[in-house]
Structure formats: structure tokens, C-alpha cells
Image (cartoon, rainbow, N blue to C red):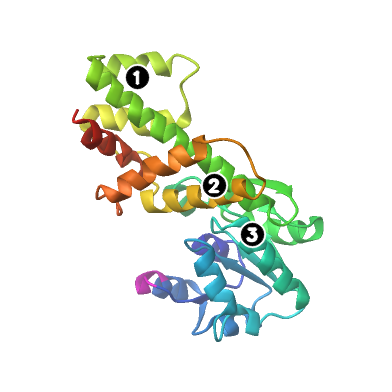
Amino acid sequence: MAKNILGGGYSLFVVGHKRRSRIDDLVQRGAREFQTYRELAEHSDLIILCVIGSPEVESILYSKDGLLEGIRKDKIVIDCSTSEPSSSEQIAISLKKLGASLVDAPLARTPDDAQAGRLNTMVGASKDDFQRVEPVLQQFCENIFHMGPVGSGHKTKLIYNFITMGYAAIISEAFCACAATGVDLQKFSDVVASGGANSGIFQLIAPKAIESGDCSGLNFSMANAAKDLRYYNRMMDTIPLSGNLGRSVQHALIQGLNLGYADGLVGDLLHVQEKLNGVQ
């Protein structure tokens, strides 16, 4: 993302986090590094965050030498993390008091798409703020959807991830059912691929898993997926929405974490089902 912003001719300021090599590469390409988020905010018109979730976003904004200490009028914070809408709404209030604003723009697609500037983003912003940030988002996003006011992007992403992780959980259980009942997995996959049950998620997971047992087709961490479903269910509780599928999907992911896949991918739900049911 940062590389593509630089490639688009924008000035880029960064704060180092975990991977020093990436910061060094950006600095060599022309970025300027600051040591604190306060300094970053003081020198930037648009500040882009892309971290794990709301606790990390809140820490970057509210901690000592955080963004809020350097925010001034007309600056915009763009949160590309998958964050909790209730937290985002409070952050928007804090920024508004300073004359600044929040844009929520969570991302979808893969790390390879990020490198190529082909991500998808779902944006929550006022019309004016969207017009200001859209040219920057275009540097690393192929498809940009303005979903509505602040918070709409994060709400959309959580519902989107509920569908994505729900597909993955169903596919994993279905493959286990095939193994338990003697249905040939390749033939089953052919049936799905030719009918209405086919999906992009199925095609990410099934071919590699059947060919070699490789569950990395859906390259998304199980821990982050469980976090997103936790956010989704808390969001639904505030409505409240009657339905138990969100918690069922979250439970499937928690089972995976508890069975040793805390560092695994969502596709490893296939292995989780194997362990739970004693089939391969």
C-alpha cells in the first residue's frame, strides 16, 4: 500500500512498527520516517492506519505522543483496519472536536493484490471527505465503494467477513461429511463448481486442499477471523438481531484456535474438522 502511494507521486511519512526492513525500503524510495505518531500527524494531511483492530487503533490515537496530540483542523484519519464500529464512532467524535474527521475504509482481497494495487475497500465518510481521500485510495485499490457516512465501511466489512468465514466453515464441514460418508472429494468439488453452491471462497479453498492438502488458499489468519466475528456478533447484539449463525461461525473459529491453530489460516478449518471427527 505504502509503496503504491509513493509510486503515485505522493509525499509519504511513516512510523516504524515491527518489520524494520519494510520501513528501510520505503525510506530508500523517498518516504520520511518519524519516531512518534504525534509527529506524523503534525506533518500529514491524511493519516492512514492499517493495523489488527480497534485496540491498536485506539492506542495509536490516544496514547502519549499519539495521533490526537498532533491532529489539527481539516486533517483526516483513514482507518483501513477491520475495526469495531462502536469504537470508530467514538474516535470520529474525538476527531470532530479538533476540527478533523475519520474515514473508515477497511480492505478486502489478498496480500498479492495489495502489492499490485488491486485491493477492494468499503468506505464510510461524508461526501466531502470521500472526495478528498478517493485519489489516495485509488493508488492501492481497484474497487472503491462509498457505503455511506462514517462507520458504514466497518459495518459492511464485518458483515462481508461473516459471509466469507461462514462459507469457509460450511465448506470445511462439508468436506468432512464427504470423507465420513465415502463421497469422492474431487467429484463432489466438480458438482459444486458446476452449480449454484459454487463461490469464490470455494475455489480458493477446495482445489489446493483436494490436490495436496494445502489449506492456504484462503490466506487470512484464523485469529483475525475470530476477532472479526467477535466484532460482528457484538454489533448484532446492539441492534439486537435475532440469529445464531454468527455465533456458530465464531464458535468454529474458536475451536480452531483452541485446537492449536492460533497461528493458522482460515482454510485450516478443514484440519479442525478432521481432528474433531476423526476423519481425513
* Crowd band around label 2 with a 10 angstrom C-alpha radius: few (<14), some (14–19), many (20+): many
Along the line of sight, which residue is nearer the eye, 125 or 247?
Answer: 247
Indicate which label's residue lies in the foreground, 1 or 3.
3
Residue at 47 percent across and 20 percent down: it is 197
Instruction: Give the vertical position of 9 relative to 160 (above or below).
Output: below
Any part of residue 142 in sight = no
Alpha-carbon distance for marks 1 and 3? 40 Å
Magenta stretch prevailing secondary structure: helix
Please tell me which of labels 2 and 1 falls first in the chain. 1
**Residue 86 - label:** 3
Looking at the image, do the residues carrying marks 1 and 3 touch, with CB atoms under 8 Å apart?
no
**Residue 207 - label:** none
Amino acid under disc 3: Ser
Amino acid under disc 1: Ser
Alpha-carbon distance for marks 2 and 1? 31 Å
Residue at 46 percent across and 76 percent down: it is 27
- Callout 1 secondary element: helix
Q: Is residue 158 left or right of residue 279?
A: right
Q: On the image, which quarter does residue 201 sit in?
A: top left
Amino acid under disc 2: Asn
Q: For mark 1, what is the residue?
A: 189
* Crowd band around label 1 with a 10 angstrom C-alpha radius: few (<14), some (14–19), many (20+): some
Please tell me which of labels 1 and 3 falls first in the chain. 3
Looking at the image, do the residues carrying marks 2 and 3 touch, with CB atoms under 8 Å apart?
no
Q: For mark 2, what is the residue?
A: 233
Q: Find residue 144 and report its horizontal and vertical position in percent.
A: 65, 47
Alpha-carbon distance for marks 2 and 3? 12 Å
